[in-house]
Amino acid sequence: MSAQPDAPSAGDKPKWKFLLHTFYATGHVLPMQAVAQALVQRGHEVVWLASPDQKARVEASGAQFVATDEVVKVDTMLKTTEPTTLEGCVEALFGGRLAAQVADLRRILASYAPDCLLNDALPQGAAALYDLGEVPFFATLGVVPLYLPDAGEHAPTSALGTLLSQHRWTLPVINPQREALGLKPLSESDVVQYSAQLHIQASCPSLEYHQAMPQTHYVGPLVSQQTKSPDLPVWWDDVLAAASSGRHIIGITQGTFAMDPTSLLIPAIEALQDDPSLLLVVPSPHEENIRARLGTTLSLKESQESESNVRVAPWVPYDQLLPLCSALVTNGGYGSVTQALAAGVPLVCAGTSEDKKDTAARVRHVGAGVDLGTERPGVESMRAAVKAVLKDPTYRENAGRMRDELRAQVGAGKACRVLEDDIARSRGERGC
């Protein structure tokens, strides 16, 4: 059991020690960054185990960075594997991951005694350490759709969702790693993907079909606070002028994981670049690739000298862009979708990899956008989808309803309060 935190002053809450661990993808790291930042600001001590290439994001939160060693080897295998069967997906995602997580986390635990271990996706190593009594409190953070068994008509259609909701696929790989640690095997009725103590979901009930476990708390999108004014693209005044004149601003994004610009960015630009009523804003690191594919007539850097309606930059701050958007075209990453809906922006979804089918299904369910059902949409179908979202006010009305619900969840501050309260409650129950 970890040492008691320093005795608080009268009226102060105790300060806790947190150990965080995240999946390597940036879409998983960014929401945890918001939580880490808020925890640090509230006076807690935070150590964060993450992929080596996420060091800058971890340290920007104020947390102490520790690089994965064994987990990064498993991640490297995953990045270079293209499984074609469910069994192959299970092995790529879960093969050796639990054991690697335990090894990396134990390296930290040898000199750091956290009051809470907070893990996002694939938390089986964290769960094993809790079952072994090596950490006193274990919580999970949901930054992908909530996958529960017996979802009925809302059952997942993606391969990832199937694996995370139907434990019979993953337990044959997970259980041998648990047994090697001296733990009993899990059954299909056990909680496998989430902490049985506390699960924090970065969304809201309506977007998740009002699903919940007893330990679930919805907190809405998790976005880090900007410590300084962001550097805006040189063409940002074009966006402000277009919005003021009544033109529709269309954001086009492909997230942080599936990054091939020819699958979504290029078709979306081709579909919409000749419409003078639109201004397309495309955050993408593939600016030169886009220029090469669409021709040098697109003056993507010096837009003031161009009549093109396309504006591209490696990064555009969502908190500045989304409030100006009439629609967001996205491959359906959970973070992008929840942030867009929190701004009341309707969506055109075009993605099928990872969990994106299931995220798009949630957008359809709440009536806040169109799902094209493919990650490589045609030009005509894209044009028709954007036109439908712009012309039918129902999409924006439903997005506005989701905005109100998501904003009511408060965000990282609520996540911190839930963590603090549940840690304190668990320590009281154990008589600590």
Image (cartoon, rainbow, N blue to C red):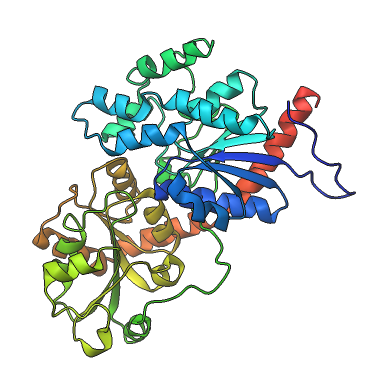
* Residue 116 coordinates in the image, percent (x, y): 65, 35
Q: Is residue 427 visible?
A: yes
- Answer yes or no: is residue 122 visible: no
Query: Toward which corner of the image does residue 377 lie, by quadrant?
Result: bottom left
Q: Position of residue 121 (x, y in %)?
A: 44, 36
Query: Residue 161: which quarter of the image?
Result: top left
Instruction: Specify whether 267 is left or right of 4.
Output: left
The correct choice, above or below, for 52 with respect to 232 in the image is above
- Report the number of discs: 0
Return the x and y of residue 21 as percentages of the image width and height: 52, 39
Image quadrant holding the C terminus, namely top right
* Residue shown at the point (16%, 57%) measured from the top left: 262
| Residue found at x 76% / y 25% | 429
> Residue drawn 60% across and 47% down?
415
Give left or right: position of 30 versus 315.
Answer: right
Q: Residue at the bottom extreme?
A: 305
Name the one closer to the observer, 227 or 199: 227
Report x, y in % for residue 243.
35, 81
Name the foreground residue: 109 vs 376. 109
Classify 152 as above or below 258: above
37 above or below 13? below
Q: Is residue 169 above or below residue 325?
A: above
Q: Nearer the viewer, residue 426 or 384?
A: 426
Image side of residue 188 versus residue 55, left or right: left
Q: Nearer the viewer, residue 166 or 173?
A: 173
Quadrant of the snapshot with the N terminus = top right
